[in-house]
Image (tube, rainbow, N blue to C red):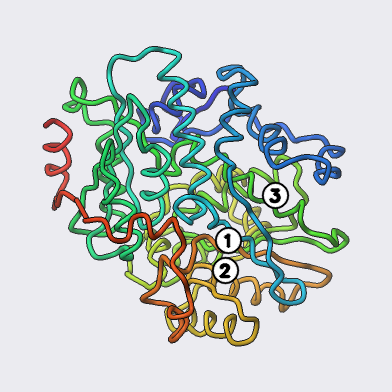
Amino acid sequence: MKYFSLNENAPNVSFRDAVVNGIAPDRGLYFPESITPLSKEFIDNLDNYSNDEIAYEIIKQFVGDEIPEQDLKEIVKETLCFDFPVVPIEENIGSLELFHGPTMAFKDVGGRFMARCLGYFNKKEKNDKDITVLVATSGDTGGAVASGFLGVKGVNVVILYPSGKVSNVQEKQLTALGQNITALEVEGAFDDCQDMVKTAFLDESLKGHRTLTSANSINVARWLPQAFYFFFAYKQIKDKSKDIVFSVPSGNYGNICAGMIAQRLGLPIKEFVTGTNANKVVPTYLETGKYEPKPTIATISNAMDVGAPSNFIRIEKLHDFDVDKLRKNLKGYSYTDAEATAAMGHLYKKFNYVAEPHGAIGYLALKNYLKTAENTQGVFLETAHPVKFMDVLYPGVAETIELPEQIKAVIDKPKVAIKISDYKGLTDFLKS
């Protein structure tokens, strides 16, 4: 499998080079040259396969022969060491819980898969120089990447996060692990962190100091494995006579774009619903046809506080950069903090279900969509455990939650972070 830059001004590369480089020399995101649908027989008989077997069938075409079959199967097995249950909420609505992994967020799958791929390439090539994984996070990506790469030989991880804009639990997962993980606390928003990371990849002055790669969802090894979730959810749906839609709370749009890859692979998804907060660049684009990135607005659903979503260009590519085609496959809604809080309260009081603000927005968007849909059922993605957002849950709910073991392991550890205010602060650190 070869990958090309969506800016179309860079050489095509292998899976290995796309993973190691993260972003193309022309600042474009890498995209697979082809997507071959899986057989209808395989998809119709998912019940006969384990999650590991399903994931291997999905990912093998994107890796090609660059990782041998047994090694790739082992990477998949180590990646998927937790459950992905669909929890029934009400008629025609279920919650796909993606928070049962080590850092209790959906990004555990991509973080673990990428770490193991990079570890395989390092071991195979016997590199004598460490690779630095440089990653920006709006909350959960950093923790998942830190956990996935913790202790991996030959790899150092540097995480940029916006000061004061992640939850206490999220911050501890970024800053308290030590070893080969370093956290940089940035005075600014997530978009500032993301811009710094993209700039660093193409900064000639850093050559010779660091070999850089990214573990944001701009990296194909972080992004593509997210397609697994949608197959796992479909496998659990008992009544497949109704149309199926997925509602994905979206910030950088990597997760929903991976769902669209699952759709291209043949999974019978009618269409997608994106729910977001006040950062509504994509819903506005679907409404007006004008794509206008905006400065980030801080909300209680901080992982979606993204004003310039990187992965949206991949979604456009999947729909031939045609807004009318995209409108047929994607509906978009945005909600205020008050509406998200009310939805959390509704889910708790009526269904005894504890949702955090991102999942609550996914639920709201799905409810809106289903108002005008016939013979349709939907699954909304609950992307993180509510414990990660204790200070913004519906009043009284936080007190009912017992800290999971994954959180107990880091919550009392001291925060260790280096404060920076601009790109020079990042380059000074990387050159030191």
| Observer-nearest of 177 and 253 | 177
Look at the numbered disc 3 and give the secondary structure of its residue.
helix
Look at the numbered disc 1 and give the secondary structure of its residue.
strand
Q: Residue at x 63, y 59 (%)?
A: 330
Q: Residue at x 80, y 44 (%)?
A: 46
Query: Which of the two discs, 3 and 1, labels the residue nearer the N terminus?
Result: 3
* Tag 3 and tag 1, C-beta contact below 8 Å: no
Q: Residue at x 81, y 42 (%)?
A: 43
Q: Quadrant of residue 67?
A: top right
Q: CA distance from mark 3 to mark 1?
A: 15 Å
Give the residue number, with chain letter if any, for mark 3. 232
Mark 2 surroundings: few (<14), some (14-19) or many (≥20) residues within 10 A: many
Query: Which of the two discs, 1 and 2, labels the residue nearer the N terminus?
Result: 1
Look at the numbered disc 2 and give the secondary structure of its residue.
helix
Give the residue number, with chain letter if any, for mark 1. 248
Q: CA distance from mark 3 to mark 2?
A: 18 Å
Residue 211 higher or lower than 351, as above or below: above
Side of 313 relative to 162 (left or right): right
Q: Quadrant of the N terminus?
A: top right
Q: Position of residue 221 (x, y in %)?
A: 50, 35
Residue 414 higher or lower than 70, as above or below: below
Q: What's the residue type where badge 3 is placed? A: Phe
